[in-house]
Image (cartoon, grey):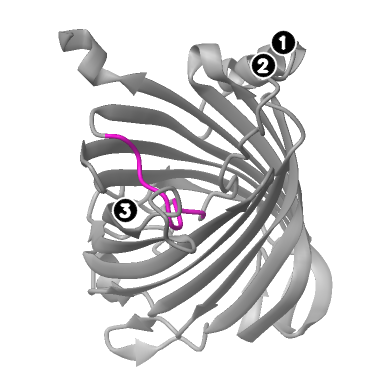
């Protein structure tokens, strides 16, 4: 499984971009986060609604980083990763979502043989509880996440312990969403801690903070920008720290296409590094990222009406 076939996903994106329609006279509503780590922030989904889809992430890097600077340009890395996602409304104000990563990383080195890293990572399963709703008169919508990581990784000589090593984890977060006319503002923060899994490896505790802005040009199109900040403690092997703590901050513009007749949304965000810091040598620090997201919603309640 060195490459996951995403040709159908690409064709679907092109088909969506080719569709044309007229916007309604009412104020259009902007869609949420496009980035692969972006959650629902302050919003929930109606009971009985099932959303499926995910992200495709393409990234490239050139060289080895240490601290906040590039050490050399010998190693070139290409990443093509997918994250398959589901979300289901259990009841009003409560839903559950999952995210399972599939990764393909190819590294070209000048002094060693080429190396491929690929596999399936551990799955994140989170409950999302809506605490406040702007539609119900609150100043903004607020929601909280609670759940964790379950061991679903494919562990082999080609796998990445960082993405998944059959380890359990616990995760919690808080997010907010605010609408002002056709403008949408999102922010969320979450924290995760992990147990020791295969290869006696324990991933470092991780903190994430996402920010997003979108303006609904029409019922079909949004424009905006997103920011993703992440900090991680060092990992450990047999209890020994690996000196691989890091801080990464990426940001960039996005475009979103929404097609209500199909209950289908698609988005593309291009990110570049704003700040990077690594405790020791880091191979594969992305110089840019392209992230595509496609989500299709199904109303399961309608099946029983």
Q: Looking at the rendering, in which quadrant would you find the N terminus? A: top left
8 above or below 31? Answer: above
- Residue 80 disc label: none
* Residue bearing mark 1: 19
Residue in view at x 36 percent, y 74 percent: 203
Q: Is residue 52 above or below residue 82?
A: above
Q: Which residues are magenta?
A: 38-46
- Residue plotted at (53% across, 11% down): 261
- For discs 3 and 2, the disc positioned in front in the rendered view: 2
Dot 3 and dot 2 residues touching (CB under 8 Å)? no
Mark 2: secondary structure: helix
Q: Residue placed at 26% from the left, 45% from the top? A: 95
Q: Earlier in the sequence, mark 3 or mark 2?
A: 2
Labels 1 & 3 near each other (Cβ < 8 A)? no
SS at circle 3: loop
Image disc number at residue 16: 2
Q: Quick one: label 1 or label 3, which is nearer the N terminus?
A: 1
Using the image, tell me which numbered label, if any, was put on residue 122: 3
Q: CA distance from mark 3 to mark 2?
A: 31 Å
Dividing the picture into quadrants, the one containing residue 284 is bottom right
Q: Is residue 186 above or below residue 249?
A: above
């Amino acid at each position: 499984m060195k490459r996951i076939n995403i040709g159908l996903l690409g064709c679907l994106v092109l088909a969506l971009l080719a569709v044309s329609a007229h916007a309604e006279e009412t104020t259009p509503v902007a869609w949420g986060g496009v980035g692969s780590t972006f959650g629902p922030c302050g919003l929930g989904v109606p009971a009985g609604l099932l959303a499926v889809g995910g992200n495709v992430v393409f990234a490239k890097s050139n060289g080895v980083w240490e601290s906040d600077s590039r050490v050399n340009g010998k190693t070139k890395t290409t990443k093509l990763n997918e994250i398959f996602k589901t979300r289901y409304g259990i009841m009003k104000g409560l839903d559950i979502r999952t995210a399972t990563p599939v990764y393909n990383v190819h590294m070209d080195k000048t002094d060693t043989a080429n190396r491929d890293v690929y596999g399936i990572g551990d799955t994140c399963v989170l409950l999302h509880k809506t605490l406040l709703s702007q539609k119900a008169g609150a100043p903004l919508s607020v929601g909280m996440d609670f759940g964790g990581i379950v061991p679903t990784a494919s562990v082999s000589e080609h796998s990445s312990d960082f993405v998944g090593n059959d380890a359990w984890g616990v995760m919690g977060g808080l997010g907010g969403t605010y609408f002002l006319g056709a403008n949408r503002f999102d922010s969320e923060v979450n924290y995760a801690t992990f147990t020791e899994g295969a290869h006696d490896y324990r991933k470092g505790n991780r903190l994430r903070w996402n920010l997003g802005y979108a303006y609904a040009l029409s019922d079909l199109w949004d424009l905006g920008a997103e920011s993703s900040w992440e900090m991680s403690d060092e990992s450990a092997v047999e209890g020994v720290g690996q000196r691989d703590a890091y801080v990464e901050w990426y940001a960039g513009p996005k475009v979103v296409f929404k097609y209500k007749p199909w209950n289908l949304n698609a988005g593309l965000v291009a990110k570049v590094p704003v700040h990077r810091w690594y405790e020791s040598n880091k191979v594969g620090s992305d110089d840019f990222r392209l992230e595509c997201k496609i989500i299709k919603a199904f109303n399961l309640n309608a099946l029983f009406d």
